[in-house]
Image: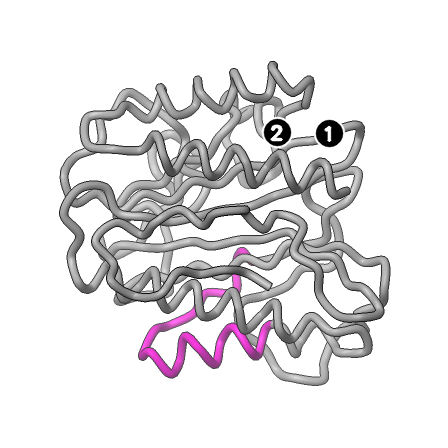
Amino acid sequence: MRPAGRFVAEVISALAEAADVGVNLLELDALAHRLIRERGAESCYIDYHPSFGASPFGKVLCTSVNDAVLHGLPHDYALQDGDLLSVDFAASVDGWVADSAYSLVVGAARADDLALIATTLRALDAGIASAQPGNKVGDISHAIGAVAREAGLLVSTEFGGHGVGRTMHDDPHIPNDGRPGRGYTLEPGWVIAIEPWFLQATDRIVTDADGWTLRSADGSRGAHMEHTVAITERGPLVLTAREREPAIRGSSSSEHTGQ
């Protein structure tokens, strides 16, 4: 699964580099589509139609802006100064899937947006650090939720991490909060996606009129981070780690480096 992880990491980096004030969300989707074709990969999104989606997704990338946090359907919207953008991308390379997400601010960044992104990154790192062989799924969930609670955030467990392999979504479900010592035992050879997402002032989400985009119920903004992680005998291995972490625009904090 390493090639799939490297490819997804490269696409996330390219999207973060391309995202800027005035760039249209459809341009970002077209960039991801071109990179898929050039690599000979396959999109996990374009024909995806789970029970919670109104129709097949139809795009190859999720772009969630400001109060949208998950499953953002790319549409004709040019990014504006200060927008908080989350991109989520999954692809199959030679029949194996990797999945990753990243949040950033384009243009001038608000302090509360940077704080939310930083908290989400810390939660991702905490979840990865807990993905040790012999630990339980609940240990990952608890580590993520503890970071959120320390920052004063509410946590929704409606959507979260998941198994990854030949398909994008597999067992087990990995909620972003939970009790330690509960759930399946993590075993070497497992591959999972760990993906904390938080909203600034609520844990309630609503579905947009497009039938896909999930927004906060109160209009507060959201951030979303995700890595595909292999459980090995020596500990977690981040398959979607990026060679150079994209900058969180306007942030003076140290860069997130993964594990």
Question: Where's the C terminus, which quadrant?
Answer: bottom right
Mark nearest the camera among 1 and 2 is: 1
Q: Which residue is mark 1?
A: 93
Question: Which image quadrant for residue 95?
Answer: top right
In the depicted structure, whether residue 28 falls above or below residue 159: above
Residue 204 in percent (x, y) is at: 36, 60
Specify how the rendered protein is coloured: one colour
Report the side of 134 relative to 125 (left or right): right
Magenta residues, as a range?
141-160
- Label 1 to label 2, Cα distance in Å? 17 Å
Report the side of 138 relative to 65 (left or right): right
Residue at 72 percent across and 36 percent down: it is: 3
Counting residues from the N terminus, which is met first, the one under dot 1 or under dot 2?
Answer: 2
Residue at 65 percent across and 56 percent down: it is: 238
Local crowd at mark 2 within 10 Å, few (<14), some, or many (≥20)?
A: some
Residue 104 in percent (x, y) is at: 32, 48
Report the side of 162 relative to 233 (left or right): left
For this rendering, which residue is in front, 4 or 87? 4
* 145 in magenta: yes
For this rendering, which residue is in front, 131 or 257? 257
Q: Which residue is mark 2?
A: 48
